[in-house]
Image (tube, rainbow, N blue to C red):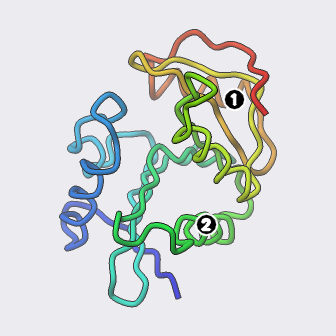
Amino acid sequence: MILMKETNTSTSEIDDVEKLYYSAFPEDERCPFDEVKNLKLYNSKLLSYYDNENFIGFTFASFYEDMIYIVYLAVSASERNKHYGSKILELLNKKFNDKTIILSVEKPVTEGDIASRRLNNFYKKNGFNVVGFEFDNSGVRFILLYKGKFNAEKFKKFLMLNFPNCINFTDTDIT
């Protein structure tokens, strides 16, 4: 059974989260880890996940009105391909079933961009839908996926409050 723990600088899980953070995300998609561990984002939570005592991954999410924006979701390399990503999303959905869950993925650059397409397909397989716009953040193009009821204007307001570097919102036809 997967266990979710709220994590912060005073918990023992923070070292596991930090190692995974640096190994799972490319530098151009990371903010300074101090911002994550010190919960600098509006109403944010750092959640770590365990199968028994075994650390399997983490999410860093911001809660805004009736939405949860998952900024980061990562599963330990040794635990991938064991359906833990799906189990984490399922646990989030059960725990916060009254909220819309939103996340962003890097937009596939080319038809052959297999890694981005696999990630996009993973979220779709887990019940997420593509939102009708995309955006740039710090030079990286993202598309949004959501589960629940999505309000584009409310989400844009949230983004601009928390990620003022987000620009170039446009419609997308990726499905």
Q: What residue is drawn where x is 56% and y is 39%?
A: 114
Considering only vertical position in the picture, is 57 above or below 175?
A: below
Who is closer to the viewer here, 43 or 18?
A: 18
Quadrant for residue 13, please give it.
bottom left
- Extreme residue in the top direction: 168
Considering only vertical position in the picture, is 161 above or below 54?
A: above
For residue 81, side relative to residue 53 (left or right): right
Nearest to viewer (mark 2 / mark 1): 2
Q: Please rate how many residues cluster around mark 1, counting C-alpha atoms within 10 Å: few if below 14, some from 14 to 19, many from 20.
A: few
For residue 34, side relative to residue 105 (left or right): left
Question: Which part of the image, by quadrant, shows the C terminus?
Answer: top right
> Whole-percent x and y of residue 85?
54, 64
> Whole-percent x and y of residue 6?
39, 68
The Cα–Cα distance between marks 2 and 1, rounded to whole angstroms, is 27 Å
Q: What residue is drawn where x is 73% and y is 57%?
A: 125
Q: How many marks?
A: 2
Among numbered discs 2 and 1, the one appearing first in the sequence: 2
In the structure shown, which secondary structural element does the residue marked by tag 2 occupy?
helix
> Whole-percent x and y of residue 165?
43, 16
**Residue indicated by mark 1:** 154
**Residue indicated by mark 2:** 86
Q: What residue is drawn where x is 33% and y is 88%?
A: 53
> Whole-percent x and y of residue 67?
65, 46
Who is closer to the viewer here, 2 or 65?
A: 2
For residue 162, side relative to residue 109 (left or right): left
Task: Using the image, tell me which numbered label, if any, was put on residue 145.
Answer: none
Q: Amino acid at mark 1?
A: Lys
In the structure shown, which secondary structural element does the residue marked by tag 1 occupy?
helix
Who is closer to the viewer here, 2 or 11?
A: 2
Q: Amino acid at mark 2?
A: Ser
